[in-house]
Amino acid sequence: MIRVLLATLLLALVASSPPPAAAAEAEPANPESLLLTPLPEVFTANRFKEQVNRAASAVTVITAEEIDLYGLTSLAELLRYVVGVNVAATTSSSAIVGLRGSTSDLSHKILVMVDGRSVYYDFYGHYWWQSLPVPIEEIRQVEIIRGPGASLYGANAFDGVIHILTKRPGELARATGVAGYSNRSTARSAAIASYADEHLGVKLSGELTELPAWRDRDETSGRAKRFNLYAERVVNGDGLLSFALGRSWLDNEFVSEFVPDRLDNGLRVDYLQTSAHLGDLTLQGFITAIELRDGSQFNQEFDPRAEPDFQRITADSTTYDVELNYDRDLGCHHLVGGTSFRRNEVRSNLFVDKEPSLDARRNEDLSALYLQDSFPIAEPVAVVAGLRFDRHPLTANHLSPRVALLVYPAAGHTLRLSYARAFRNPSFVESYIGNGNTSGFAVDERLAMKEPRLRPDLNEEPDAEGLTAWELGYRGSLGSRLSLNAELYYNLLAHLMEPRERLNEEGNTIILIRNFARGRAWGAEVEGEFAASRQVELFANTSYRRFAFDDQADPAAGWGPSSFLDDGAPRWLANLGVRVCAATGWFATTALHRTGSYRTFPLRIRGLAVDPRLAAAASLAEPQTVAAYTTVNGSVGYHTRHGITLTLAAANLLGNDHLEAAATNHRYATALAGTPLVPPPEGEAAEPIGREVTLQLRYDF
C-alpha cells in the first residue's frame, strides 16, 4: 500500500515538474508566495455569500477543480473524501450517505438540494444519488454542512445539508462532450451546451450511464438518463430571472431493511423550477413529480418453500413548493428572513395494500417562517442568531433555534461556539403505511377493521425526531502553506423512529413504526491541507464518533430488538492524499481511505427473535458485523491547449474486494414441523466492491 502511494506521488511530482529551461522562471523567489487555494465563498451556511471562515456551521466545499482532479463521476464517491461523511456502496448503482454517523439505508437525515431546490424524496424520506439531475461536469461546487441546519432549512436538515450548486451558462464552455468506459463495462456519456451574453444565458445538458453489477459485469445493476434545460435573464443590472426544467430516469438495485433481497427500482423524476432575484427579495417556486415502481418480493412466512407474495410497490408523488426570501445587509446587521409553503401529494398501494375501495392518497401541507441576524458585538466577536417556525399536519409545531458565537483572535483564525436544534418529520411511509403487515402512525381505520393484524389503538400520535447540538470549532491558516479545521460536537437525540416487530395478543407478529429510542452522540473532526509547492497539495482528514442509545420499548410487551446500536456506525473514518495540478497540463491525485468496522441489525433478521413460528431460529437474530476496510484511489490526466482532457482513474486500486454494508438483510429459517434450519443465504443484499479503472475523454469547445 505504501509503495502504491509513493509510486503515485512520484508520478505526480514528475508530471508537475516544469521543463528544465523554464525551471528557474517557474520557481518563485519568495517561498511565502506559495499560497494555499484562497478560501471559497459559501452560501448554504448563512444563506448569503460569505467566506467559509465566517460561516456559522462546520462547512466543507468541493470545488469544480477538485472534481476534475479526482476523475470520479459519482457525487457519492466524491463525498468519501469529506471529513465526517460516511459513504457505503450497497450495489454499483446505490449508496448510503451519512453525516456524523448516520448509516440508515434510507439516508433520511440529510437535506439534499440542487440550486436551492430540495430533491429530498418525501415518500421514503431519502434521495437516490444516481438520480442526481445534473452531470457532474455541470457542478460549480458542493457545500456540505455538518450539523443541524433546521433554523434556515427546516425539517430533515437534521444531521446536515448537502447543497449542489451548478454553473451558470457564462461559466461553461460553449459545448462539452464526455465519454467514459471502464474495465467492468461501466459506460457513461454526457453533453452540455451553453450560450451567454450580457443579458441572457441558456444551457442544456444530458447524460447516459450504464452500471453493471459487481457480482457479474454482464448483469446490469443500474441505468440512468437525465436532461436539463436552464435559462436566465439579467434585469435591472443585478436582478436575475431564471427558469429550469428537467427529467431523470433511474432503474437500479436498492437495498432496504424492510424487504429481503435487493429491490429493482424504476424511478422517474420531473421538475420545473423558477426563480426571481430582485434587490433584497428572492421568490422561488418548483414542482417535482416522481413515479416509483419497486419490484419487491414479500414472503411473510420466512419459508423458502412457500410461494412468495409478489407485490409491485407503486408510489407517485407531486411536490409544490414556494418560498420568499429577504436578504439585507444593513452594515452592522445582516438580516435573512422568509416564509415557505410546501404541499406533498402521494398515492401508493402501500397505504391500503390490496383494498381498492380505500383511498390510497395522502396529502400534507407544510408551512414555515424563519429569521436570522448576523452582527458584531465587539471588535473580534460576531454573533449569528436565527429561529425558524415549522408546521406539520401530524407532528404539529416546531421551533428550531441556532446561535453561533464567532471569535477572530487573529487574522486568518476563527473560533466558533454554537448551539442549535433540529427535527425530522416522519416520511410518508413511516406515517401512513398499512399493508396488512406493517403499520405506520396514521393507518386508515377502515383498513384496520378489515385486517385483524392491525389495531387502531396501536397507532399513537407521532413525534418528530429531535436533535440538540453543541459544537466547538476552529478554522485557520498557519503560515501560507498549512490550513487546519477542527470540530468537537455533542448531540442529544430524541424520539428516534424505527420499525419493530411485536407479538400481539393473537400470537401474530406485526411491524409497527414508532418513536422507540433516544440517545447521545459525540465526536471530533480534523482536516488539514498543506501546500508543498504551487502545484502539489497534500490533504488529510479524520473523524471519530461515539453513540449511546436508550431503548424505550419494553421487551416484556413483546417488542423485538432495536436497530439502534452503540457501534452501529464506523467510529473512525480517515483520508490521506495528494493533489497535483501542473502548469504543463498534467494533473494527478491519489488518496487512501479508511473506514472502521460497525454492526448492523436489519429488521428481517431482528424479526426472528419474536416470531413464534421461528422459535428455534431465535439464535440467528444477531447483529451483523461489517469489517473495516482500506481503499486507495488514484487518477492521472492531461489537459491539452485545444480543450481536450484525458483522464485515467482507478477506484480501489489495490483490488481489495470488500463489503461496505451487510451482505444479507434477512435470514430465512424453516423451524416449522421440525424441519432443520436453513442457513442464511449469502450476497442477498450488499455485494463486494472490487477494482475499477475508467478511461474518460472530455472535449470543451
Image: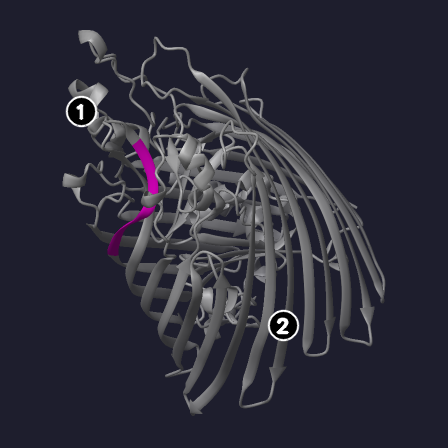
Figure check: 240 above or below 331: above
Q: Residue at x 32, y 65 (%)?
A: 468
Discs 2, 1 touching: Cβ within 8 Å: no
> In the drawing, what numbered circle is on residue 89?
none
* Three-letter amino acid code of the residue under disc 2: Asn
Image position of 373 (left or right of 329): left
Circle 2 residue: 325
SS for callout 2: strand
Q: CA distance from mark 2 to mark 1?
A: 55 Å
- Based on the picture, tell me whether residue 639 belongs to the magenta stretch: no
- Bin the neighbour count of mark 2 within 10 Å (Cα to Cα): few under 14, some 14-19, many 20 and up: some
Task: Give the image location of residue 132, x and y in percent.
Answer: 60, 43
Seen from the viewer's position, the closer of residues 548 and 506 is 506
Pair 2/1: label in front? 1
Q: How many marks?
A: 2
Task: Give the image location of residue 229, x and y in percent.
Answer: 77, 48
- Based on the picture, tell me whether residue 518 belongs to the magenta stretch: yes
Which color scheme did the rendering employ for the protein? Answer: one colour
Seen from the viewer's position, the closer of residues 93 and 681 is 681
When asked about the image quadrant of residue 342, the answer is bottom right
Circle 1 residue: 618
Span of residues in magenta: 510-519
Task: Give the image location of residue 572, x and y in percent.
Answer: 28, 48
When asked about the image quadrant of residue 320, the answer is bottom right
- For the stretch drawn in magenta, the main secondary structure is strand
